[in-house]
Amino acid sequence: MEEEKCCCPEDSMANIDSCSCSGRTKHRSEKEYKDLINRLKRIEGQVRGLQKMLENDVYCPDILVQVSAVNCALNSFSKTLLASHIHTCVLEDIKAGHEEVVDELVETLQKVMK
C-alpha cells in the first residue's frame, strides 16, 4: 500500500501522519476528538463501500448517488471542524491580540471553498 503524502507544498514528501502545514497543533477535548474520529471512520467505510461497488460492477448512477453521500459527509465534517476552529483557535488568538488569525481564516476559507 502506498504511503499517503502531506498536502503541504513545502513539505510534500512528509508522511501524512506527521503533516502540519502551519507548524501549529490543536488540543481537542476527548469528546470532540472522538466525534471527529467517528465521523472520519464512517466516511472511510463509505469510501470502501464505493470501491466494493465498483469492483462488483454496480450501475454508474447507483455509485454516483453514494459518491454524493460521501461528499455530503465530508462537507459536514468540514463544517463541524471549521465551527470548532472559529470558536476556539480564532477566538483565543483574537483575544490575545493576534488579529492576523483573521487573515489566516480568510485564506483557509478561500482554499476550501474552491
Image: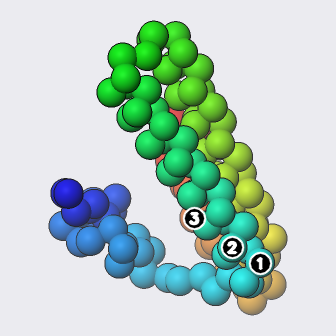
**71 or 46, nearer to the observer:** 46
Whole-Å distance between the Cαs marked 1 and 3?
26 Å
Kindly state the secondary structure of the residue where label 3 is placed: helix
Asked if residue 42 lies left or right of residue 60, the reply is right
Q: Position of residue 83 (x, y in %)?
A: 77, 60
Asked if residue 12 lies left or right of residue 45, the reply is left
Q: Residue at x 54, y 41 (%)?
A: 46
In the image, which is nearer the foreground, mark 3 or mark 2?
Answer: 2
Q: Position of residue 102 (x, y in %)?
A: 67, 65
Identify the image quadrant of the N terminus: bottom left
- The answer to the question of whether label 2 and label 1 lie on touching residues, with beta carbons closer than 8 A, is yes
The residue pinned by badge 3 equals 104
Asked if residue 93 lies left or right of residue 3, the reply is right
In the image, which is nearer the foreground, mark 1 or mark 3?
Answer: 1
Task: Report the amino acid beneath label 1.
Answer: Lys
Q: Residue 40 falls in which quadrant of the image?
A: bottom right
Which label belongs to residue 34? Answer: 2
The residue pinned by badge 1 equals 31
Query: Colour scheme used in the picture?
Result: rainbow
Which label belongs to residue 85? Answer: none
Task: Report the amino acid beneath label 2.
Answer: Lys
Task: Give the mark nearer the N terminus: 3 vs 2.
Answer: 2
Asked whether residue 82 is in view, the answer is no
Kindly state the secondary structure of the residue where label 1 is placed: helix
Residue occupying the far front of the picture: 56
Asked if residue 8 lies left or right of residue 3, the reply is right
Q: Is residue 54 above or below residue 3?
A: above
Q: Residue at x 42, y 81 (%)?
A: 23
Q: Position of residue 10 (x, y in %)?
A: 25, 66
Q: Residue at x 43, y 26 (%)?
A: 53
